[in-house]
Amino acid sequence: MKWIGASAELVMDHPVEAVWEFVSNVENFGRWVDAVREPRWTSEGERGVGSTYESEYVWSGKTSHVKYEVSEYEQPVKFASRTTEGRFPYQGTITIESLEGGTKVTHDMMAGSDGSITAFMFTYLGWLLRPMMKNRLLKELETMSDEIGRDAASG
């Protein structure tokens, strides 16, 4: 399998705690991650490393069922997960850092190839794909910030 990675960061005008509450609840993922639909916890009990969740993932008009596991959970600074089943191998880490006047949120993501064509693309077109991935991650962080703002205004 071939992996390709990208990273984006955004300084948000929200407190660390609000960002953590939003990010660490996977049921919010569908509100800010473009291709994720119907995310839901599948494990019971307290959330942390080893907790599991699932979602539908829509890409190129096709919907795939994906299962995930939380791989890092450091309240309120880091939330990471990875796929355990599904068509699209993924590893992602969100890091939250308090700054004077805001909160810096960094999203590091690794996507794995799902076949020989994707592996070829990652190998030979990675220079083109990485900036596209970074732009998508930045757009999603902007959407996350907007959604956290909506929650704060309504609640």
Image (spheres, rainbow, N blue to C red):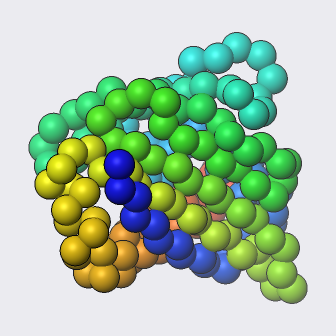
Residue at position x 36%, y 37% from top? 37
On the image, the x and y values in percent for residue 52 come to: 60, 25
Residue 22: where, in percent of width, then height? 66, 49
Which residue does the image show at 65% across and 59% down from the upper left? 94
Say whether residue 22 is visible: no
Most foreground residue, 32 or 147: 32
> On the rendered structure, is 149 left or right of 14?
left
- Is any part of residue 53 visible from this angle? yes
Q: Nearer the viewer, residue 4 or 105?
A: 4
Residue 135 left/right relative to 12: left
The residue lying toward the viewer, choosing from 102 and 110, is 110
Residue at x-position 86% and y-position 85% = 100
Residue 155 in the image, given as x and y percentages of width and height: 70, 48
> In this picture, is 15 found above or below 31?
below
In the image, farthest residue toward the bottom: 100
Q: Specify the farthest residue to the top.
A: 44
How many numbered circles are shown?
Answer: 0
- Left or right placement of residue 60 versus residue 52 in this view: left
Q: Please, is residue 72 above or below residue 85 in the view? A: below
Q: Position of residue 46 (x, y in %)?
A: 80, 23
